[in-house]
Image (spheres, grey):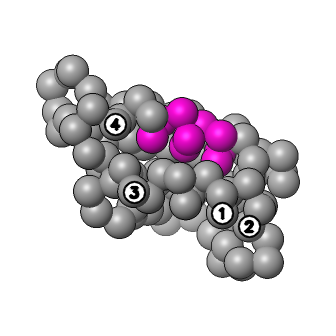
Amino acid sequence: MYLLRRITKTQQGKAWDVANLMSKICAAYEENGRTKAQVFVSQGLPGTPNVVYAEWTQESIEPNWPSKVPEAVRTLNAQMFPMLTEPWSIEFFELVTPQKLEERNLS
């Protein structure tokens, strides 16, 4: 299982607007079968300000083919991009499970 995190750095004062659009983007993917995502902001707390994150889990890492991207995502991304200070990035993490530890003789 993998944890995926999409990171968007926003213009000053736009984090909540971007979080709203990111929530809608995640919902469109969820309608296509992706697992539920959590969207959160780093705004007014210790940490890097004006950053919006979306995290979800997947059983495997597979290409996100353009033909499988919901049309709503294309529209919402177009609305979101002008509010970003740099292109979004995505991080991939493999979750540690007892089975994976055992396979590596680490249990």
Percent x, y of residue 45 = 20, 21
* N-term mark: 3 or 1: 1
Residue drawn at (45%, 34%) of the image:
17
C-alpha span from label 2 to label 3: 20 Å
Q: What kind of residue is marked 1?
A: Arg
Q: Residue furthest right?
A: 32
Q: Note whether residue 80 is visible.
A: yes
Mark 4 closeness class: few <14, some 14–19, many ≥20 residues within 10 Å? some
Question: Which three-letter amino acid code belongs to the residue tagged 2?
Answer: Val
Q: In the rendered structure, are the residues bearing label 2 and label 1 in contact, judged by CB atoms less than 8 Å apart?
A: yes
What residue sits right under mark 1 in the picture?
74
Dot 2 lies on which element?
loop
Q: Distance between the Cα atoms at labels 4 and 3?
A: 10 Å
Q: Which residue is mark 3?
A: 82
Q: Earlier in the sequence, mark 1 or mark 4?
A: 4
When the figure is inspected, residue 72 is found, relative to residue 48, above or below; the finding is below
* 97 or 89: nearer the viewer: 89
Segment colored magenta: 18-26
Q: Amino acid at mark 4?
A: Lys
Q: Earlier in the sequence, mark 2 or mark 3?
A: 2
Residue marked by disc 2: 69
